[in-house]
Image (cartoon, grey):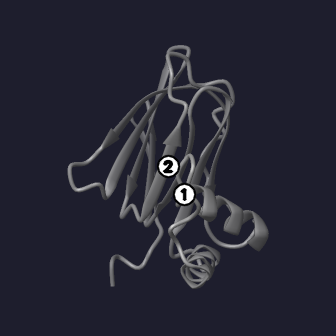
Amino acid sequence: MSFDVPSLHDAQLVGVCVSASGDKLTLSMVDGDLKYSLFLGGVRAFRLVDMQIQNIICNLGVHSGFGVSENKLRGLLEWVSSGVETTSYMTDEAISRYVDKIERGELALVVIEPSAGAELSVLCETVEYRTKGTEQRANKGDGGN
């Protein structure tokens, strides 16, 4: 199952704000006159590459619960925890634990697949989506317990 957030196909990612503690991210997106914000809390890992002047979203996915294959989740977790020229810093056991927590709906994996520009993956506990004064919330995670 994926959290109910639109794919925002052809919207632009125009901003990424990271809290000083590194455990919160705010993503700002626009599509014409519409503005969107995604607030991510309890960040466990994130990776952002290729941010440039124009960052067009092909698909925005929020994965939590069942519905995504274990192999795909493992691949995304390996990517989010690696660098340009390094392998994942997560052990196979840690990746397996995170896959289990995602499948149980305790954590979410937020993924922006680009048409152009920024590619992003975030492993987090909470996801909050807002557009034009409308608010939708999902609390995913163990609350740090």
Badge 1 is on which residue?
82
**Three-letter residue code for mark 1:** Ser
Question: Which amino acid type is shown beneath numbered disc 2?
Answer: Arg
Quadrant (top left/top right/bottom left/bottom right) for the N terminus: bottom right
Above or below, 56 relative to 63: above
Q: Are dots 1 and 2 in contact, CB under 8 Å?
A: yes
Secondary structure category for the residue under label 2: strand
Q: Is residue 25 left or right of residue 65?
A: left
Q: Which residue extends farthest left?
A: 20
Task: Examine the rendered structure and indicate whether residue 54 appears above or below residue 101.
Answer: above
- Give how far across and how far down residue 27 sits, in percent: 43, 38
The answer to whether residue 31 is visible is: yes
Could you say whether the residue bearing mark 1 is in a helix, strand or loop?
loop
Above or below: residue 2 compared with residue 142: above
How far across and how far down the image is residue 59, in percent? 69, 39
Nearer to the camera, 121 or 94: 94
Number of callouts:
2
Quadrant into which the C terminus falls: bottom left
**Could you tell me which residue is drawn at 63 percent across and 33 percent down?**
8
- Circle 2 packing at 10 Å, graded few (<14), some (14-19), many (20+), is some
Whole-percent x, y for residue 83 in the image: 52, 51
From the image, tell me which residue sits under label 2.
47
**Location of residue 17 in the rendering, given as x and y in whole percent from the top left corner:** 33, 38
Does residue 137 show up?
no
Q: Quadrant of residue 62?
A: bottom right
